[in-house]
Amino acid sequence: MGLHVALYLYAKSLCATSLLVQIRTLDLALVSIYRGGVELASVSQYSGSPYNTTDRQVNLKISLQLRGCFNWSMYPQSELVVFARVSDPAVDLETTPPDGPWLEATASAVPWSLGVDIAIWNAVGWAGWGEWGVCSKTCGGGKQTRRRYCSRSSCEGYGEQGRSCNSFDCEGTINPLAPGARRNFHPAQARWGPVPDRPHAFSLRPNSYIWIASSELFAAGKTFPREFTLFISLRLRPESGGYGQGTLFSLRSRRRTGSFLSLELAGRGAARLVHAGAGSSRSIYLAVPLYDFRWHHIAISVHDDNTVRVYVDCRWLRTDVLEKDALDTPRDADLIIGYLFSGDLEQMVLVPKAGQAHKQCSSLAVGVTPFVTPRDT
């Protein structure tokens, strides 16, 4: 009657149907497989890598006896964890459609949450993922990896993942933190210390910042572009208590007093993009979970002086369309980095093109090293 295995899935429910008289069904798009990927891949329609089933559509059928375990009104277009078994088409042809295997519910399904996700990974032997490492290139397309550890003799899945990063074009890119870049430290470079585990990062203390004149940002005759993308990678230190303060990035006009465009930290778990000019100011708030003291990535793309698209940690966060010229960037702008900021800063890259925010890092992580053995203790 099929493959009797414990199958834990993180899935997105696409729709609920009632095709059979005594069996209700769900169409699911698999997002993550906690356990049972090998068995699922052994079904003929899913031959190949057992962990390549992300976004594959499968069907979940719930027997009459278990229908009371499901809140059907909640599941359409929701994310849930399914506890099920695989029903092999080769064995169960009468009840399995030709377009893919069924998942036959043997227990229940619960709404997905980060806490549930962590608990299940721990239950099947995996510790949480560590930090993403340094991107191998500052532009032009690099790679970075992260690792996790298995607490058992072996664990099903990958102990290492990789993703693409900094895939934007190098042409015209301004990287004021690059080793060979010219910088003007105030008051002294000594307050920008090294970060032990990140070779190209700076550890900043308050009252120390970089000020770069507009004449040094671009070639002669060039002004600050109307459209651009800003990439930043940073983390707070534990002594901050998780409350971020200071200005990460500010473009300030030399000729117009009070005209600037800045990215500021705004307390616990938030940043804001602030523009001031012509006697008015406006702010766009960004949710950034800096209070976990891990590295976070912010990418901001400005289009046509009125549209802002923001990505945080490789995922789209928001798009704001404002009135015309609402974000009129000062053309004679000096660049200020790290004013009153206390924390670690690894990336501060400016690309004179819009629509590049998604290129800071990919949201798609690919498994690299499966079946990791336990960490030495």
Image: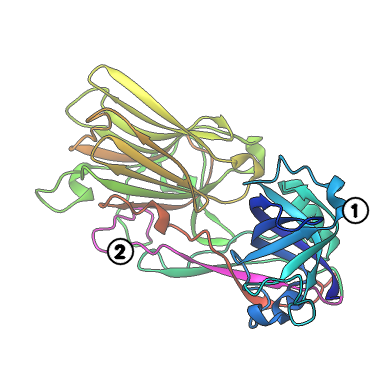
Image quarter hosting the C terminus: bottom right
Q: Earlier in the sequence, mark 1 or mark 2?
A: 1
Q: Are marks 1 and 2 in contact (CB under 8 Å)?
A: no
Side (left or right) of 61 relative to 197? right
Q: Nearer the viewer, residue 296 or 155?
A: 155
Q: Residue furthest top?
A: 279
Q: Amino acid at mark 2?
A: Asp
Q: Residue at x 86, y 75 (%)?
A: 1
Name the dominant secondary structure of the magenta segment: loop
Which residue range is magenta in the image? 153-178
Residue shown at 31%/30% (left/top)? 322
Query: Residue 11: within the magenta?
Result: no
Quadrant in which residue 173 is drawn: bottom left
Give the residue at mark 1: 65
Residue displayed at 72% across by 46% down: 113
**Residue situated in front as seen by the camera: 111 or 310:** 111
Image position of 192 (left or right of 281): right
Compare residues 149 and 90 and report the one nearer the observer: 90
Q: Report the mark closest to the observer, 1 or 2.
A: 1
Mark 1 nearby-residue class (10 Å; few <14, some 14–19, many ≥20): few
Residue 183 is situated, as x and y percent measured from the top left of the image, at 32, 50
Residue farthest to the right, as pictured = 65
* Residue 26 point in image, percent of width and height: 70, 55
Residue 13 visible in the shown view: yes
Image x and y of residue 198, in percent = 54, 60
Q: Which mark is on residue 101?
A: none
Residue type marked 1: Gln
In the image, residue 24 sits, relative to residue 290, either above or below, namely below
Q: Residues within 10 Å of mark 2 (few under 14, many from 20)?
A: some
Above-or-below relation of 49 to 204: below
Query: Residue 169, which numbered label?
Result: 2
